[in-house]
Every structure is written in C-alpha cells, then in structure tokens.
Image (tube, rainbow, N blue to C red):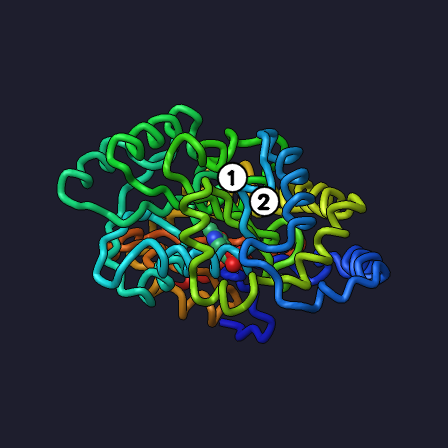
Amino acid sequence: MTLHTNLINFGRGQPSLSLLPLSAWRTATDHCLAQGDAALLQYGIEEGDAGFRHSLAQFLSRRYVIPVTAAELVVSAGASQALDLVCTRFARRGDTIFVEEPTYFLALEIFRDHGLQVVGIPIDEDGISIEALQHALVHHRPAFLYTVPSFQNPSGTTMTAARREQLMAVSQAHDLLIVADEVYQLLDFGTAPPPPLAAHCHSARVLSLGSFSKICAPGLRLGWIQGAPAPLHTIMQSGVVQSGGGLSSFVSGVMRSCIDLGLADAVLDGLRPVYAERSAVLCRALRELLPAVTFVEPAGGYFVWAQLPTVRSAAEFLPVARAGGVSFHAGVRFSSGGGFAQHIRLSFAHYEAPELEEGVRRLARALTASAA
Ligand SMILES: Cc1ncc(COP(=O)(O)O)c(C=O)c1O
C-alpha cells in the first residue's frame, strides 16, 4: 500500500483556513478601535458588556426567530468553557449527569475533568428517547442532562419539535436542568431546525450554550450562555468570571462591530452553502464508492455519522486507514458506554470537494485492504 504524507483527516471538526473571515474581522476591529473607547481594554462586568449583549440579542432574535433580550445572555469564552462553568456551578464531583448516546466526545472529557458519572440515554432519528430518559430517571437523580439538539455531533440528528416539547415536560416534572449545546443551531443547509431549546429558558430549567466558533471563527473563543436570571446568576458567581471581570471582553467588543456592520450575518450566510455543498459531495462519494456503508445525509452541521458493516472495530481499523492516508474519529469515542464500535465520524467542514472525494477513495481502498 502507498504511504501518504498528506493525510486527509476527516476527524478535523474545524473549518478550512480559507473559510475564516480574516477581512471581515479586520474591518470589525478597525471599526471597534476607531471609537477610541479604552474601557474595551479594561476588566468588565460579569455578564459581559451591555452593548455587545444588546447587539448579540438582536442577532439571535433575527437568526433564531424567537425574541431574545440582552438580560438573558452572559458572555462566555466559547461553548467548551461554558460547559466547564456549568459543571463547576451546577454539579459536584461524583454526581451523575445524563448525556445523549452517542454524544460530543470532548464534552465527555470535560465531564471527566469534573469527576462526573456519565449515564448515556439513547437517541433515535427524532432525538433523545423520552422513554429511556424516563426510565433512567427512576434510577438516577442527575445534576443535569447534556444535549446537542440540532445537527448533533456526531450523529447529525436534529431533535423534532414534538420531542423538544416532551423533553421540556420531563424537565419540568423532574426539575431536571437541561444543558442545551446549540452550537450548530444556525448551521442548517436550507431548512431551519425547530427553534432552539433556548426558547424555553423562562418556562423550563434550560441553559442554552451558543458559540461563534461554528458560525464565524473558533479562534475568537467567544460564545454565550442563555438562560433565566437565577441560573445565570449562579454562573456569574463563579470565581473565574468574578476574578476575570467577565470573559472575552475585547473580542466581544469587536464582535459587536461585526454584528452591527452586518458582517456576522454575511459570514454565516456565506458558510451555510459551502458546508451544504461539502456535505453533499462527501455523501455522494460515500454512496458511490462505499454503497454498503450506512448513514443519514445531514441537513446541517459538520458531520456524517457512518456505520461500516464490514469492520468489527473502527478503532482497530483506524491504523490501517491512516497508513492509507485517511483518518477519522472512531465511534467508540462518542459513547459513554463503549458502544458504536462500527461507527465513524467524518467531518466535511475542513476540506474542499477534491480532497473529500479522495478521502473517500482512500477509505474504500483501506476497507478493501483490511477485508483481504
Ligand atoms: C457539540 C459541540 N459543542 C461545543 C464545541 C466547541 O465549541 P467552542 O469552540 O465554542 O468551545 C463543539 C466543537 O466541535 C461541538 O461540536
């Protein structure tokens, strides 16, 4: 087999460099600095700058198509950091939490950092199984449930509106805090998912985590937590938030300009068709070159979650694939219970069409080699 030096790594859940909005960010930075406000470089308030949160609320009201106010928003340094804060403030070492099965593998690492006991609740094509959730609630009293409701990482699944309603009913009945990681909510390929769980933050116990990582640029380390006053207050009492004078102050100042100048909308509207096209290319190549592989074509987000029927363990197959010049994340990494041995997660965000196609060709060759 040929050894490839230019690995095509479908594991990369990040945009290609060409998609990062360097020029928009430069315009926004110039605009922001031209206002001559030195307070931008000062410690800020815990919830984040009021002007930025006002602009963010307008952006979200427009894009989520639900009313969002600045008072519901606290600035974070991205969804990962927000999740870490949620663990610090709403759970204690040894507590049980619920996650979807499968779930975002790095969230599992954050929960491990906090010494949390993770219980997986299965999902189907409509999102989390309410029956399984209710059954699990008979045996456990979790500190919270972590869900990625739209274009889930890794499965691409979107929770239906009916399932969201049922989840909210369970949350209310059991006083269960729902931590909704909604970083892909705005990244649909043409058909919007149901409104975010953020829409329920006043009627149910919901904290919604948002981020500019997927809709603008991950290096900004800028996101937000949306919720009712009481849980937001709990977040703001964090030592890190108090000591730091809020989070990501300068970047949020520049993002305010980015939103006010219409650049944030333009960047997002530019990304969606690109990802839609990349997803279509990857799925077409999989169908043509690997017809036995099963997957559901995603309607948004970053990922294709595929099952390799001829492979017993995708983790064991990975070194063979890498030797053949292609990589991915094995499904078992997304499981809290060692499941999904035959699954792989392929990201289409990082590569252009020819590399996506070449990656699938290499995958097909490696699968043939491993079967021989
Ligand atoms: C579900 C999910 N949450 C959070 C993150 C990370 O978000 P951030 O860059 O805002 O920390 C990712 C990135 O892949 C993700 O897929």
Q: Residue furthest right?
A: 34
| Residue 101 seen by the camera | no
Identify the residue shown where x is 38% and y is 33%: 204
Residue at x 60%, y 71% (from the top left corner) = 6
Q: Looking at the picture, which amino acid does disc 1 mark? A: Pro
- Mark positioned earlier in the residue sequence (1 or 2): 2
Name the disc covering residue 298, or none: 1
Q: Position of residue 288 (x, y in %)?
A: 54, 43
- Furthest toward the left, the residue is 139
Q: Is residue 57 above or below residue 67?
A: below
* In-front residue for pair 157/204: 204
Q: Quadrant of the C terminus?
A: bottom left
Local crowd at mark 1 within 10 Å, few (<14), some, or many (≥20)? many
Q: CA distance from mark 1 to mark 2?
A: 7 Å
Q: Are marks 1 and 2 in contact (CB under 8 Å)?
A: yes
- State the residue position of label 2: 279
Left or right position of 228 against 30: left
Q: Secondary structure at mark 2?
A: helix
Q: Position of residue 282 (x, y in %)?
A: 57, 47
